[in-house]
Image (tube, coloured by chain):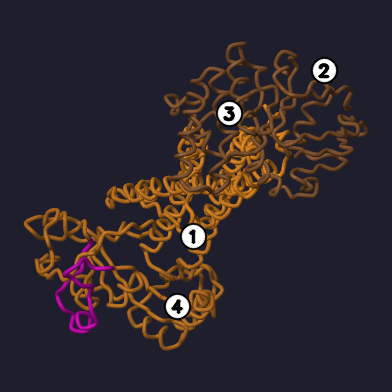
Chain colours: A brown, B orange
Amino acid sequence: MIELKGIKKVYRMGSQSLEALRGIDVTIAKGEFVSIMGPSGSGKSTLMNIIGCLDTPTDGRYLLDNDEVAGLSFDQLAAVRNRKLGFVFQNFNLLPYATAWENIELPMLFDGKSGRKRKQRVKELLDAVGLYDWRDHRPAELSGGQQQRIALARALANDPPILLADEPTGNLDSKSGEEIMAILTDLWKEGRTIVMVTHNDHIAAVSQRVIRLFDGQVV
Amino acid sequence: MNLTLPRFFWSEYRKRRKKASLITFALFWGTLSILLLMAFGQGMSTQSHVAFSGLGETLMMVYGGQTSLAFEGLPKGRPISLYPEDVDYLKDRIPEILRIAPEAYTYLQVSGGGKEINRTVHGTTAEFALMRTQVPQLGGRFLNADDVDKGRKVAFIGWKVASDLFGPGVDAVGKQIVINRIPFTVVGVLMKKIQDSMYNGPDADQVYLPFYAYRQIDNRRRINQIHIQPRDASQSKLIESRLRILLGRKYRFDPEDPYALSLWNTIEDYKQGEAIFKGIEMFLGIIGALTLLIGAVGVTNLMYAVAKERTREIGIKLAIGARRRVIVQQFFLETMFVFAKGTFWGFLTAFNIVNLVRLAPINYDSFGIEAYLLRPELSLQIFVVYMIILGVLVFLSGIFPALRASRSNPIESLRYE
């Protein structure tokens, strides 16, 4: 379960400061599919990054499965990102020089999983996203939809209970977008918690609940 | 030991090695040029020392002269000659003298092997060899004390004399040469050497006879010069003043008269030469240091650019759960590997070039610039110092951006373009 209480995020640039989040209180239950929506600059991505432990709040409490996240060290946060959270980015963020197989394998390498386990899991995931035949291709040799499916497979590598998707269809054509949404829906039905940032009402409609942000606050 | 991560680092390095090749090449080229520069500089310096000692080491030569000052009622302009007994006279009275030898010479016809040539023929003693770097070729020897005492008809000849008389490559030891109708048996041939100081031409062209045997073909009483080697090079000035006093007393000239005796003090020449060698070494050292600095700046720049270029990659790895130490370890290992690879190939290439150049023969007969250039010396000491300095610079230039990237907010790294 994700519990955010009074989360604030202030960016300081010299003498100027920008309040990106102004006291967010959000609870997301286990197994829920939630969309975060809002106009540009409303704080969606900032909130998503805090939930994904990629960024830390300036103030407030963040409880992940009842554990306080705010006080964790850099490496402890890395461990949380590695095991509990899977992240899907709008621009895929795959390593350009690594093959599809190697990109998916990476989170398991960082978790110290054995070669046999890694091999088995990568194969499962490539089969699940329908790209086993593309395993030796590098991202530049794959279409946007294929890259996002590889990114999804990578997010699932360590079998995390929570999947965070930041505009996962933002850079895709409608057909590829639908394919990705179908996979996310299946994953949610399997029992995973899905948190998704989107601009698109049609895509948000797939989720159970929409959290709307405006000017750093939930509206 | 869990080798998963090192294997992963290696596989990542292999994928990026084309990008790393520029840094590897920069390290290779820098290592090669600095080592070669220093090797040729060191070789030149050593060869200059060798060439200088071709005449002799810590050597003083005394010649007769003509007085330029009136002394004890005697007019100026009197010739002063040296005689064989002056050798013992000086040795008995100047304890600082380690070795002393007389030398008399004249230009004569030398026959042997059916040929006749004109060469300077010298009469001297056994100690001459030690003072004047007269090293015999294998199978031969220089004149010894017995040869001198018994006036044996033996000769030690320069390698060019041997070659001119008996032909190149022919062993002259045991063969006979004739001077003034007197036959002499060759007991030794001078080993080839480079020699940048000489009188009467290079030693390669000289013929040496035992002093008393020489007197049979040149019956002049006086000798041309006396060779002196001090016990310690620092005593040369003291010996010089003492011998002026002693010989002045004996031959009645003013010890302060600069022209009564002529003195060639190679020790003083050597000191001047040494200053020039040191100057050359310092100059090359400065060039080496500047080259190293330029190379290090280049490598630092490349390393920094690579680390910057990889900021996004680091962001991705952090986002999917890489610990900080994984990022730093990977950078460290890659940097050190590239460093080791570049410097290793640079060292190996420099080593091979130096050894290849050293195989080139030196023409001892013409003794040109190649005698200085063709004997480079690779200094392990310079290589170690170079490795330490460059290693630290490369390490710092590679590790700091990596440390900074590993400490940065993953989001900022992901946004880096």
Quick one: label 2, few (<14), some, or many (20+) residues within 10 Å?
Answer: few
4 or 1: tag closer to the N-terminus: 4
> Is residue B60 visible in this depiction of the protein?
no
The span shown in magenta is: B135-158
- The mark that comes first in sequence, 3 or 2, is 2
Q: Which residue is mark 1?
A: B381
The image shows residue A86, relative to residue A145, as above or below, that is below
- Report helix, strand or loop for mark 1: helix
Q: Which amino acid, mark 3?
A: Ala
Q: CA distance from mark 4 to mark 2?
A: 97 Å
- Cα distance in 3D space between marks 3 and 2: 25 Å
Q: Secondary structure at mark 3?
A: helix
Q: Quadrant of residue B217?
A: bottom left
Q: Which mark is residue A151?
A: 3
**What is the x, y in percent for residue B78?**
45, 71
From the viewer's perspective, is A113 left or right of B397? left
Q: Position of residue A55 (x, y in %)?
A: 76, 38
Type of the residue with mark 4: Pro
Per the rendering, the mark at residue B230 is 4
The reply to whether residue A157 is visible in this rendering is: yes
Q: Which mark is residue A39?
A: 2
Callout 4 touching callout 2 (CB < 8 Å): no
> Chain under label 2?
A
Q: Position of residue B331 (x, y in %)?
A: 58, 45
Given contact means CB atoms under 8 Å apart, are the residues at marks 3 and 1 in contact? Answer: no
Q: Classify B28 as above or below B365.
A: above
Q: In the rendered view of the protein, which quadrant contains the N terminus of chain A?
A: top right
Q: Amino acid at mark 2?
A: Pro
Single out the mark in the foreground, 4 or 1.
Answer: 1
